[in-house]
Amino acid sequence: SWSPDSKRLATDGGDVETGVVGYLWDVAERTPVVSLKGEVGFVRIRWCADGKLVAASRDARFRLYDVVSGEEQARSDQR
């Protein structure tokens, strides 16, 4: 999904070996700038309206990530 300013793109991309669940891309540079780590298998990644967080989800489980550091900020594991 596109960031609110359309300068970055969030994509899913699970990698069992590294634990990466998605990437945040710099569209102009065409390079990933942040890796989001967690459980592989999240299928939706969406930006929060203010552009400071992204949410990765699957079923009723989700993770919120800081878009600068890629660090997890919150989670819900309920199914």
Image (tube, helix red, strand yellow):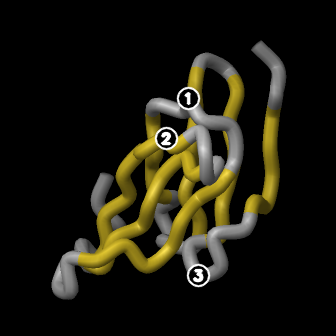
Q: Position of residue 74 (x, y in %)?
A: 81, 52
Instruction: Name the mark on residue 72.
Output: none
Residue 77 drawn at (x, y percent): 82, 27
Look at label 1 and name its amino acid. Answer: Gly
Under circle 2, the secondary element is strand
Q: Amino acid at mark 3?
A: Val
Circle 3 residues within 10 Å: few <14, some 14–19, many ≥20: few
Packing grade of label 1 (10 A; few <14, some 14-19, many >=20) is some
Q: Residue furthest front?
A: 17
| Residue at (49% x, 41% y) in the render | 14
* Residue 60: image location, x then y, percent: 67, 20
Residue 68 is marked as: 3
Q: Residue at x 58, y 25 (%)?
A: 58
Residue plotted at (66% across, 61% down): 65
Among numbered discs 1 and 2, the one appearing first in the sequence = 2
Q: Is residue 1 above or below residue 49?
A: above
- Extreme-top residue of the structure: 79
Q: CA distance from mark 1 to mark 3?
A: 22 Å
Q: Can see residue 31?
A: yes
Distance, label 1 to label 2, CA atoms, is 6 Å
Q: In the image, residue 61 lies at what x, y percent?
A: 70, 27
Q: Circle 2 sits on which residue?
A: 14
Residue at image x 20%, y 77%? 30
Among the 4 quarters of the image, the one containing residue 33:
bottom left
Secondary structure of the residue carrying tag 3 is loop
Residue placed under numbered mark 1 in the picture: 41
Q: Are marks 1 and 2 in contact (CB under 8 Å)?
A: yes
Instruction: Answer with left or right where residue 5 lies relative to residue 41.
Output: left
